[in-house]
Image (cartoon, rainbow, N blue to C red):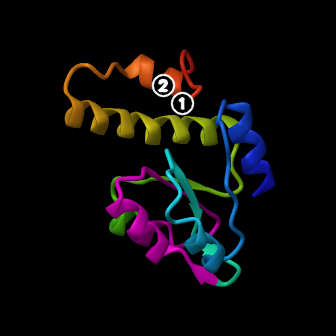
Amino acid sequence: ALDCETLLLGLGAGSVHLAGTVPEARALIDTNFDLAILDWNLNGENTLAIADELRARNVPLLFVSGYAEIRQIAERFPEAQLIAKPYAVDVFSNACRRALDGRVRLLAELCGPAVHRDAALEDEGLAGTT
């Protein structure tokens, strides 16, 4: 989790909230997230219920897992980005960008053409990185 936090801050994230258990993740559920990065397993519990709640709030999802459940995640959350652990930094950063790009497309659909992709990426601290 700390490696993930360091990577996200290096990519320009303004803040990163970490949860090591499903109850800790539930406590953060009302936070206004731009992107949720979830491991399949948090201290022995899967995060599917958390992902369901975040998806209902239109929060882009990135699953990071070292488990064989990647197929199950892909079937249940086809819109989510998936990467397997261990991952390379470029794989992680590209997956974050793709997830946020999906969010930018959603915002553009909701708000009309006034939302420009580069401006939204700049707001995310990721301008010029695609």
Locate residue 73: give its quadrant.
bottom left
Q: Residue at x 45, y 77 (%)?
A: 49
Q: Residue at x 23, y 31 (%)?
A: 111
SS class, disc 2: helix
Residue 66 shown in magenta? yes
Q: Position of residue 124 (x, y in %)?
A: 54, 30
| Residue sitting nearer the eye, 96 or 107 | 107
Dot 2 and dot 1 residues touching (CB under 8 Å)? yes
For label 1, the residue is 124
- Whether residue 11 is situated above or below residue 34 in the rendered picture: above
Q: Residue furthest bottom?
A: 44
Q: Position of residue 48 (x, y in %)?
A: 46, 74
SS class, disc 1: loop
Residue 23 shown in magenta? no
- Whether residue 14 is situated above or below residue 35 in the rendered picture: above
- Whether residue 34 is situated above or below residue 124 in the rendered picture: below
Q: Position of residue 8 (x, y in %)?
A: 68, 40
Q: Residue at x 59, y 72 (%)?
A: 27
Locate residue 117: give its quadrant.
top left
Residue stretch rendered in magenta on the structure: 45-73
Please give left or right for residue 12 compared with residue 82 in the image.
Answer: right
Locate residue 66: give its quadrant.
bottom right
Q: Name the mark on residue 121.
A: 2
Please give left or right for residue 110 compared with residue 55 in the image.
Answer: left
